[in-house]
Structures are given as structure tokens and as C-alpha cells.
């Protein structure tokens, strides 16, 4: 079995034979029932893969979805212009860094759909390129934003810089409301919600599904999915570690289960820790070793937790 560890491209997973846990029914439900959404999940929890899946869907790449749930649900595949903004790939230590990142994205979209020299601010340019993309293609536009809060988290100890970032992002995302009639779908993800109110205060039609029980399993791995997709892998893991398969399932649950995104919902397994364990056949703290966000460490330190006491301890 090929495990998609660190792979965030839906197309690569589907074309190169990696295992894919089918989340496409959620994508169809979101696309068919609404327009503007926000989702908060921890790092390394599958948000980028979800965004990539949406991008492939809205590009009309039906061949990538053969055999998946959405192939039985979607009857008319359409191709939409997609604007995908990934804020993961930058170190935001100055306002210039954020402005440069947004300017780069806008410039790439303007190369495709045209620009207007009278549009000078980032927000005005964003609004303009959305309108032109819709007019040029004859279709409404899809907006996908991954890790909207990355700049805010990196400036968590710098109030002035954080306020500057909020002002920049608020003006930028304000274009979504101004260009509403040209937008088919918008989906934004982040790790936290602490900046959501101020950054998106003008976007009052944004539906937050972070703690909506209908979407609690949209990222991560459920108990049922673990058994459906990885039963043979769990058997191998058990054999290598001198355990019965039932004991191995119990250890996996103890180590990697326990995420709940609403009351009385099934626990969700952390996908990064789970996949690494099944691949290496070793139980370790994979997520904390590689995916611990600065925000979490900062909060633990503020509460006087001794981080060295937690490293290597899962229980």
C-alpha cells in the first residue's frame, strides 16, 4: 500500500496509486448546498488535500473521481475558473512579505484574465480579477484559500504586526463580498478562529463548518475508515510489534484517536500520525515532532507547561 504521507495533491494521489480516503461526498454536499464556507482544523490534518480535491472537482476533472462517492452524485460536470491562494509557503515577518505574497497571486491571475491599471489596492485588484475571470470564461469563479491565518499566527507575539495583517487581509477578503455575483463557491481554511471575526467581519455570509456535526469527519480518519481502508496494514503493524490485531487497534485508538469537532460525535484519528505509524510500523509522536504549530507551543508556554515533559509521552 502506498501511503500519501505529506502529499497534498489530490491528482497525484489518484494518478500515482496512493490510498485515498473518500471524502468526496462532503465536497458535493458543500458545493450543492451553499457558497461561502470556513473550516478550522489542526495542522497536518488534511485541509490542503481537501482544498486540492475541491480544485480538481471545480476544474471538472471527472476522470480523477471515478469510483468515488461523488461520481454517483454529480450528473453534470462543469469547469470553473479557480483561484487557489495557499498562504502556507511564506515566512511572514513583515507586512511586505504578506503584500508580496498576495501581489504574486494577483499577478498570476491577472496574467490569465487581464488587469486594470486603475486598480491599485490589493482588494480592488482582487475584486477586478474575479469579475474579469467570470466575464472571460462565462462561468462564476471558485475561490480556495488555504491557511488564511498563517500570517496572524506567525505574528502572535507582535500585536502591531498582527493588527497590520488583519487590516491587509480584511481589505483583501472584502473583495469576496463586493464580487459576490461573480462567485460560485468560496472555501477558506485555517488552524484557528481567533482572527476570524475581525478578518471576515464584512463577509457575514461565511458559514463556519468547523464544529458542524455534519462535517466532523471531513478531514482526518474515522474508526470505520480505519477498518475499511487499512485493516491489512493494521494486521501487519500488529505482527511487527508482537500484538494481536485487536490490541493494535486499541493502541492506535489510544495514540491517535480522540479529536472531536462537536458533542457526541465519533472520534477522529489524526491522519499524519496514523499514516506514519502504519507505514513505519512504529508507534511514535509523529505529529508533535513535525507538525506542532507555533501557536500551540506559545499557548502551552503561557500556561507554564514544561514542554520537555511531554515530548515522547503520548499518555
Image (cartoon, helix red, strand yellow):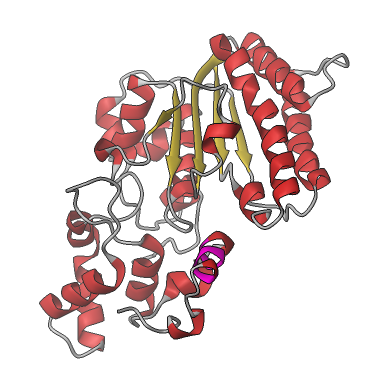
Question: Which residue is at a point 31% across and 24% down the rendered structure image?
Answer: 74
Q: In which quadrant of the rendered view does residue 309 lie?
A: bottom left
The single residue placed furthest to the right in the displayed view is 117
Residue 137 seen anywhere in this rendered image of the structure: yes
Does 117 lie within the magenta span? no
> What type of secondary structure mainly makes up the magenta span?
helix
What is the x, y in percent for residue 167? 71, 33
Please state which of residues 16 and 29 is positioned toward the viewer in this rendering. Answer: 29
What is the x, y in percent for residue 224? 17, 55
Q: Is residue 88 above or below residue 176?
A: below
Question: Which residue is at a point 35% across and 28% down the rendered structure image?
Answer: 30
What is the x, y in percent for residue 70? 30, 33
Q: Is residue 69 left or right of residue 174?
A: left
What is the x, y in percent for residue 275? 36, 67
Q: In which quadrant of the rendered view does residue 158 lie?
A: bottom right
Please state which of residues 96 and 283 is positioned toward the viewer in this rendering. Answer: 96
Q: Is residue 73 left or right of residue 89?
A: left
Question: Which residue is at a point 33% across and 38% down the rendered structure image?
Answer: 24
Q: Quadrant of the C terminus?
A: bottom left
Please state which of residues 298 and 27 is positioned toward the viewer in this rendering. Answer: 298
Question: Which residue is at a point 37% across and 41% down the rendered structure image?
Answer: 210
Range drawn in magenta: 296-301
Q: Is residue 81 left or right of residue 77?
A: right
Q: Quadrant of the N terminus?
A: bottom left
Residue 139 seen anywhere in this rendered image of the structure: no
Q: In which quadrant of the rendered view does residue 69 lie?
A: top left
Amino acid at each position: 500500500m502506498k501511503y500519501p504521507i505529506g502529499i497534498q495533491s489530490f491528482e497525484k494521489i489518484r494518478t500515482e496509486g496512493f490510498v485515498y480516503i473518500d471524502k468526496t461526498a462532503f465536497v458535493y454536499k458543500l458545493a450543492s448546498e451553499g457558497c461561502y464556507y470556513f473550516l478550522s482544523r489542526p495542522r497536518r490534518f488534511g485541509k490542503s488535500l481537501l482544498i486540492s480535491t475541491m480544485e480538481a472537482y471545480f476544474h471538472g476533472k471527472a476522470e480523477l473521481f471515478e469510483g468515488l462517492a461523488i461520481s454517483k452524485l454529480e450528473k453534470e460536470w462543469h469547469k470553473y475558473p479557480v483561484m487557489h491562494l495557499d498562504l502556507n509557503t511564506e515566512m511572514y515577518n513583515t507586512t511586505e512579505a504578506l503584500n508580496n505574497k498576495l501581489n504574486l497571486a494577483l499577478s498570476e491571475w491577472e496574467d490569465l484574465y487581464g488587469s486594470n491599471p486603475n486598480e491599485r489596492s490589493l482588494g480592488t485588484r482582487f475584486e477586478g480579477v474575479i469579475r474579469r475571470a467570470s466575464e472571460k470564461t462565462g462561468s462564476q469563479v471558485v475561490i480556495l484559500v488555504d491557511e488564511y491565518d498563517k500570517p496572524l499566527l506567525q505574528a502572535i507575539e507582535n500585536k502591531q504586526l498582527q493588527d497590520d495583517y488583519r487590516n491587509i487581509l480584511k481589505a483583501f477578503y472584502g473583495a469576496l463580498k463586493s464580487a459576490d455575483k461573480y462567485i460560485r463557491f468560496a472555501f477558506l481554511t485555517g488552524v484557528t478562529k481567533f482572527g476570524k471575526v475581525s478578518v471576515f467581519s464584512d463577509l457575514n455570509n461565511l458559514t463556519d463548518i468547523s464544529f458542524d456535526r455534519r462535517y466532523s469527519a471531513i478531514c482526518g480518519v474515522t474508526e470505520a475508515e480505519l477498518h475499511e481502508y487499512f485493516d491489512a496494514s493494521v494486521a501487519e503493524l500488529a505482527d511487527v510489534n508482537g500484538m494481536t490485531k485487536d490490541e493494535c487497534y486499541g493502541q492506535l485508538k489510544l495514540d491517535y484517536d480522540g479529536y472531536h469537532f462537536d458533542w457526541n460525535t465519533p472520534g477522529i484519528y489524526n491522519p499524519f500520525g496514523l499514516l506514519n505509524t502504519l507505514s513505519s510500523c512504529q508507534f511514535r509522536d509523529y505529529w508533535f515532532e513535525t507538525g506542532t504549530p507555533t501557536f500551540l507551543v506559545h499557548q502551552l508556554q503561557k500556561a507554564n507547561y514544561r514542554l520537555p515533559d511531554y515530548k515522547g509521552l503520548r499518555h
